[in-house]
Amino acid sequence: MSNNNHTIEFATFTLAEGVDESTLIAAADALQRDFFSQQKGFIRRDLVQVAERQWADVIYWESRDSVEQAMQVAPSNPAALHYFQLMVNDGESDPASGLMLMTVAKSYSWQQI
């Protein structure tokens, strides 16, 4: 058990019509290489399939400030812009409508069982 106060960014999305899984994975790889790997406070990221055409990015950060800094520069990053274009635009004015930020209260691992 540990208390680390990391922040988890949980962002759900739906693939746009005509976008297949291989296109998403290629764009996710580019996003990792050209954006996330360069962000201060980035720890790790998991791309998960929730259901047919439904996905989520689960991103681990050192702090909420790290997330907020990354969110400020994402709109000007070509890899991030390309990735976001693969998602359904539901017309909401808030681009973060599928986004949740959570602070880790306590962490456990299988090694501690």
Image (cartoon, rainbow, N blue to C red):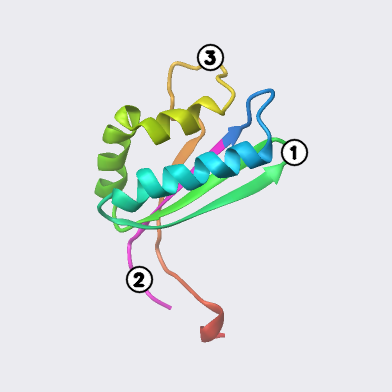
* Magenta residues, start to end: 1-12
Residue 103 or residue 13, whichever sits in front: 13
Please name the amino acid that badge 1 sits on: Glu
Q: Nearer the viewer, mark 1 or mark 2?
A: 1
Q: Quadrant of residue 3?
A: bottom left
Q: Label 3: how many residues lie within 10 Å, few (<14), some (14-19) or many (20+)?
A: few
Residue corresponding to mark 3: 91
Residue corresponding to mark 1: 52
Spatial separation of the CA atoms under disc 1 and disc 2: 35 Å
Spatial separation of the CA atoms under disc 3 and disc 2: 39 Å
Q: Earlier in the sequence, mark 1 or mark 2?
A: 2
Please name the amino acid that badge 3 sits on: Gly
Taking the spot 59% from the left edge, 23% from the top edge, the residue there is 88
Where is 3 relative to 60, above or below? below
Q: Quadrant of the C terminus?
A: bottom right
Is residue 11 visible from the viewing direction of this image?
Answer: no
Q: Residue furthest right?
A: 52
Taking the spot 46% from the left edge, 29% from the top edge, the residue there is 82
Counting from the top left corner in percent of width and height, residue 19 is at 65, 29
Helix, strand, or loop for circle 3? loop
Residue corresponding to mark 2: 3
